Amino acid sequence: MKIIGMKGSKEIIVCFIVLLCISSTVGLKLLNTGLPTLGEAEPKPNDHFKSFSTICRQKGYPFEQHKLKTYDGYFLTVFRIPGAKGELLEPAIKANKPVVLLWHGLLDSADSWIINDEDKAPALMLANQGYDVWLGNSRGNKYSREHRFLDPDRDEDKASFFGFNIEDMANHDTNSTVAYIRQETGKRSIGVIGHGIGATQFLLSPQTGIEVLVTLGAYSSLNHTQEKLITTLANNPKLIENLKDAKMYEVFGEDYVSNKIFSAICENSPSVCQYLLEDIMLVESEYINIDRVDEMLSLFPSGTSLENLEHFVQIYTTKKFQKYDYGLELNRKIYDHDIPPLFDLSESPNFRVVQIVGEEDHISTPLDNHWLNSQLESSVEYYGSFRIGHYSFILGKDMSYLEEIIKLFKQDQWS
């Protein structure tokens, strides 16, 4: 595969990381032809590479795992923590607590909500505050790689299985999950907290059954983003075309190759880890719980589609918050127009919005969130700005923002 027109050493590093993580095949080839052997680390008393269920059970939280089918045939795994630490499963469920659904970011999974220290992990904090906590997983990530008749590991099915973008996730994943949770719990309405794209999915698909949506660094306009992955791909458009030509429709899938490398780097080489975090991932080390970074990187990224990633590259390139650009011919067929239409956020959603912004968020920046706020207008009942970054929402050492959210929830409860 020939990469054309890369600019600068940092962009070369980012492109290398993209290729390393893009699929297990590429990752394994690179490991076998030039990267040093890391070896198998000795088992440690931490959360490295543990599943969501294992982490919950070992920490002593009641836990359920559910699987639901979306309206277009994808099977999504949904986790549930219905009670506080030490609480038994059945009594916790029978307590009929208010429900909060958490939704992860672009390349993430439900793992992100429980990987921080126990007193700082958002899902565990909410469970200990008396909430029935549910956690979604978008199509294509490591927990949601199933379909009614498509196999993501079969060559002839990959293009179709991974032929989705944020609009598909908004129209199907969120709707199906909210409907399923309401049916399982008998609740009239639920609260939702979304991180990054996880918040955007709900904004693009206003639906019944949600009382309040909390957006944590929601993606919308990306005019001011410094996200290295998006900006590098935008500056090297041939890379995405090369990946399509190579039929690599899944990106950053859970092959554990990249996860092992990044986790080992942060465990054994703090200076290299700091460069990787601050210069490449734009993690604000001043504001995150640095002791949990190697755990996070052992479980992140969790996979999505190339089309989904390309969609955000298009938004950044065009400076328009618009639907996916399929090209002239398909645009005319799908949209009845040469170019994709803009997403319309002017229509008030059927729920209240709490917008939380990180002042040091270089991915979903304060300026871009200010634009989003202007689009949502009267729907936003609370706008909170905190001195944290994008990853601090899930791995912060100061979780004051979530404490403020819980105060708001307690003041205006739902059932």
Image (cartoon, grey):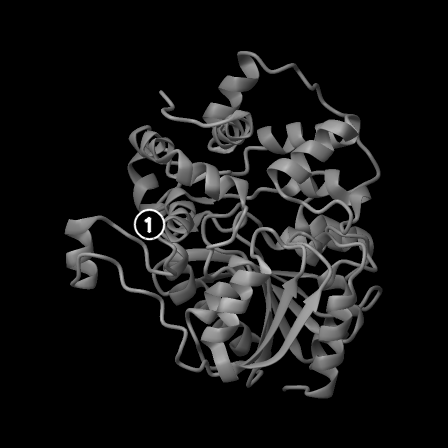
**Vertical placement of 46 versus 216: above or below?**
above
- What percent of the width, then of the height, locates residue 261? 65, 27
Residue 13 falls in image quadrant: top right
In this rendering, the answer to whether 318 lies above or below 167 is above
The amino acid at mark 1 is Phe
Q: Which residue is mark 1?
A: 149
Give the image location of residue 270, x and y in percent.
Answer: 78, 30
Residue shown at the point (36%, 72%) measured from the top left = 344
- Quarter of the rendering occupied by the N terminus: top left
Residue 57 locus on image (x, y percent): 76, 54
Residue nearest the viewer, comparing 377 with 395: 377
Q: Look at 73% across and 87% down and name the residue there.
A: 411
As rendered, which of 94 and 177 lies closer to the eye? 177
Name the image quarter holding residue 320: bottom left
From the viewer's perspective, is 185 left or right of 292?
left
Which residue in the rendered view is the most extreme toward the top?
33
Q: Give the secondary structure at mark 1.
A: loop
Query: As rendered, which of 186 and 233 lies closer to the eye?
Result: 233
Query: Is 43 left or right of 147, judged from the image as shown?
Result: right
In terms of image quadrants, where is residue 380?
Answer: bottom right
Residue 298 visible to an observer of this rendering? no
